[in-house]
Image (cartoon, coloured by chain):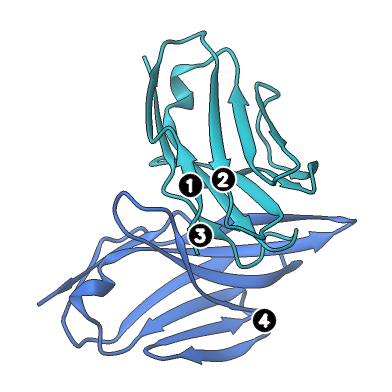
Chain colours: A cyan, B blue
Amino acid sequence: KAGVTQTPRYLIKTRGQQVTLSCSPISGHRSVSWYQQTPGQGLQFLFEYFSETQRNKGNFPGRFSGRQFSNSRSEMNVSTLELGDSALYLCASSLDAGLDEQYFGPGTRLTVT
Amino acid sequence: QKEVEQDPGPLSVPEGAIVSLNCTYSNSAFQYFMWYRQYSRKGPELLMYTYSSGNKEDGRFTAQVDKSSKYISLFIRDSQPSDSATYLCAIRYSGAGSYQLTFGKGTKLSVIP
């Protein structure tokens, strides 16, 4: 069974731009969660989607948004990029909502200049 | 006080040693305890999870939870060079219809042949 895939793997953007990251979960998984990982703050929960609905949200500003499609694929959008948004963005999928037994993708490395 | 504290290391041990990795947490509402392993340039991989106080064993790995002390541990027996990675504890709490997953910042482990 194929794992979680994320595209693109690397991205360089300029401050003020917006970016969209994509995540394809493991086949049959209906829950997708997004995380930001930085050396300073570690791994932080952004939000969780299940059956196209946002189930939970972490403590991030409204510039961070996401959505989930009927095939469980998910996208995350960051608008008005700031230098501090440079991070590894990880997507994880699981069978059901609840953030249990998640399988992570390899991440998208975003650099904001 | 951060919700989850984890010594970042780095921790360096000889092959065959017993490794002890630890986290402390502050919120007694935390219910679900996990350990993830993250290799360089990869997403985290779930190693073990448990709900209850006590020990849970899986091969060379033992997860221990002490809810009275708000302390969790991961022990690795007969450590191998392939165990060299960053280990993250993760704790989930549920309450008032929502839940959150909080990660420690990770301990970087090197097992020297």
Please say if A6 is above or below B24: above
Mark 2 touches mark 4? (CB < 8 Å) = no
Residue B71, by quadrant, is bottom right
| Amino acid type, callout 3 | Glu
Q: Which residue is mark 3?
A: B5
Mark 1 and mark 4: Cα distance apart in space:
40 Å
Q: Identify the secondary structure beneath mark 2.
A: strand
Q: Secondary structure at mark 3?
A: strand
Q: Is residue B92 above or below residue A17?
A: below
Labels 1 & 3 near each other (Cβ < 8 A)? no
Mark 2 vs 1: CB contact within 8 A: yes
Mark earlier in primary sequence (2, 1) = 1
Q: Chain of mark 3?
A: B
Q: Are marks 1 and 4 on the same chain?
A: no
The crowd level at tag 2 (other Cα within 10 Å; few <14, some 14-19, many 20+) is many
**What residue type is disc 4 on?**
Ser
Q: Position of residue A101 (x, y in %)?
A: 61, 67
- Which residue is under mark 1? A5
In the rendered image, residue B44, in percent from the top left (x then y), is placed at 44, 58
Asked which quadrant contains residue A113, the reply is top left
Q: What type is the residue that disc 2 sits on?
A: Ser
Contact check, label 3 and label 2, Cβ < 8 Å: no
Horizontal relation, residue A101 to residue A56: left or right? left
Q: What separation in Å lies between label 2 and label 1 (alpha carbons)?
A: 5 Å
Q: In the rendered view, does A54 fall on the left or right side of A85?
A: right
Question: Which element is circle 4 on?
Answer: loop
Q: Nearer the viewer, mark 2 or mark 4?
A: 2
The residue singled out by tag 2 in the image is A24
Give the number of the disc on residue B68.
4
Horizontal side, residue A75 vs residue A2: left or right = right
Q: Residues within 10 Å of mark 3 (few under 14, many from 20)?
A: some
Residue at the outermost left position: B113
